[in-house]
Amino acid sequence: MKLQRLHDWDLTPKEAITVQQHLRTQVVAEDRLPAIRRVAGVDVGFEDDGRITRAAVAVLSFPDLVLVEQAVARRPTTFPYVPGLLSFREIPAVLDALGQVRQPPDLILADGQGLAHPRRFGLACHLGLVTDTPCIGVAKSRLIGAHDEPGEEKGSWAPLTDAGELIGAVLRTRTRVRPLYISIGHRVSLPTAIELVLACTARYRLPETTRWAHRLASG
């Protein structure tokens, strides 16, 4: 996987916000997707009281969702925990894990926000730009925005809006189970993001990509 060097990672929180405000203009919110044969889930955990970042990548075949490759990377945590700036804390280790993967994914589902972020530049946007790979934010909880409750059936969704702007979807991935918060990361439209998340979801609330990556990141 060819990575884009868009900025340094040794930044202060104030400098990181400036980077977000600059890079958010480069996010592509429309479909620019290759043929999808492999999808990846990424997740991050921490060890040694947060001093070590542990990132996991699980690559699955698509559409049958069979695990084909996995990687785990650890590195010292160098960026503080600051809400809204988690990508600067987590992505360096994620890139280390992606660097171990021999079969790069055509699509990444990130455990976090994309456009559904105060500066419209969450982890999924950041990771999508750095890897130049279509990316979707799949979050278990809401960071910002307002929404109505989606229908109870799997596939039902409600718009997530902030200041009059559509920033994501509240998607029911399993009937009568708490929804997920889906938002654009990079090179994918919101309708396609919803469709792909559902295609990656089998019997459980979380997509299979996320379930595999979470298991590795927290193991």
Image: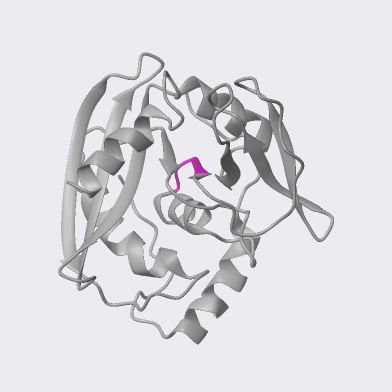
Determine if residue 100 is in view. no
Q: Quadrant of residue 101?
A: top left
Apparent side of residue 115 relative to residue 148 in the rendered image (left or right)? left
Q: Residue 43, image x and y in percent?
A: 33, 48
Vertical position of residue 41 compared to residue 75: above or below: above
Which residue is found at the position 20% from the left and 73% from the top? 51
Apparent side of residue 96 relative to residue 154 in the rendered image (left or right)? left
Apparent side of residue 116 relative to residue 210 in the rendered image (left or right)? right
In magenta, the rendered stretch is 132-137
Apparent side of residue 178 relative to residue 110 in the rendered image (left or right)? right
Vertical position of residue 36 compared to residue 90: above or below: above
Which residue is found at the position 42% from the left and 72% from the top? 7
Q: Quadrant of residue 93?
A: bottom left
Q: How many marks?
A: 0
Q: Specify the farthest residue to the front.
A: 176
Which residue is found at the position 55% from the left and 70% from the top? 20
Determine if residue 106 is in view. yes
What's the image's color scheme? one colour
Q: Residue 107, image x and y in percent?
A: 43, 35
Q: Specify the farthest residue to the right.
A: 164
**Quadrant location of the N terminus in the rendered image:** top left
Residue 15 within the magenta-colored segment of the rendering: no
Which residue is found at the position 40% from the left and 50% from the top? 131
Q: Residue 90, image x and y in percent?
A: 34, 62
Q: Nearer the viewer, residue 140 or 37?
A: 140
Q: Nearer the viewer, residue 205 or 91?
A: 205
Vertical position of residue 157 compared to residue 42: above or below: above
Residue 136 within the magenta-colored segment of the rendering: yes
